[in-house]
Image: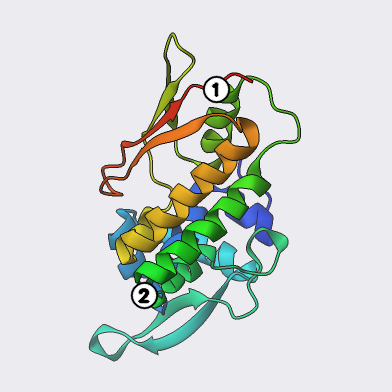
Amino acid sequence: MDIPHGTEEAALAQPTRARIFAFLVGHRGAASTDEIARALDLHPNGVRRHLDRLAEAGLLERRRSRGERGRPGDRWLVAAGARPGGDRPHAYADLARWLARAIPATADREREIEEAGREIGRELAPAEVGDPAETFTAAFAALGFQPVLDVKADGSFSCRLANCPYRDSARENAAIICTLHRGITAGLLSTIAPTAELVRFESHDPDDADCMVDVGAGRGD
């Protein structure tokens, strides 16, 4: 059974239509039906039906242009008033990349960035803290790092971060993004385990991930 159409949310609930819309968002311009079909390895006839639904829902605009041999053809682009998900559009990922590119990685700036990260990390700490290692891991899991926890007998622990959710920004300016992340890590740790010590923060290529965080056991009172 197909998803009812007529609204933006319903239109994007269908997986193929969501892929088509995402392609056009990334394309940043008009594309023909055949171009979309080739890019997504779909049949043009099926793509055409999905494009009609997306246009009907107000997500896409159709423009007529001269195709091969002078025949008119449709070109599609994201509608100016599109509200995917029923809300105004946002571009957090793009903004983060652009900001990363714009910030120079000087020593003074990195100190400022790390301190800002510490403040953010303190804000990320949950109101109720249980086991520090589990709380720490849960916070990083919620941020998308896919942490793998290893708790030692002495209470210290390590986290291998199997994913870098900031990889697009880190490609632009790894020094700034990783410094911010180190600050976030230290700030979070200072709140959930004030006596613990951030022993190691080892960043790797964002596409490979596997960054390492080692936390020393808390000191006794």
Q: Amino acid at mark 1?
A: Arg
Circle 1: element type? loop
- How packed mark 1 is, by other alpha carbons closer than 10 Å (few <14, some 14-19, many 20 or more), is few
- Left or right: residue 112 versus residue 205 is right
Between disc 1 and disc 2, the foreground one is 1
Residue 219: numbered disc? 1
The answer to whether 93 is drawn above or below residue 58 in the figure is above
Q: In which quadrant of the rendered image does the C terminus lie? A: top right
Q: In which quadrant of the rendered image does the N terminus lie? A: top right
User: Residue 155's spot in the image, x, y percent?
Assistant: 49, 15
User: Residue 138's spot in the image, x, y percent?
Assistant: 57, 30
Residue hosting label 2 = 104
Asked if residue 208 shows in the view, the reply is yes
Circle 2: element type? loop
The residue lying at 59 percent from left, 24 percent from top is: 132
Q: Nearer the viewer, residue 15 or 181?
A: 181
User: Residue 179's spot in the image, x, y percent?
Assistant: 41, 55
Q: Quadrant of residue 211?
A: top left
User: Residue 123's spot in the image, x, y percent?
Assistant: 67, 48
- Left or right: residue 68 versus residue 219 is left
Colour scheme in use: rainbow
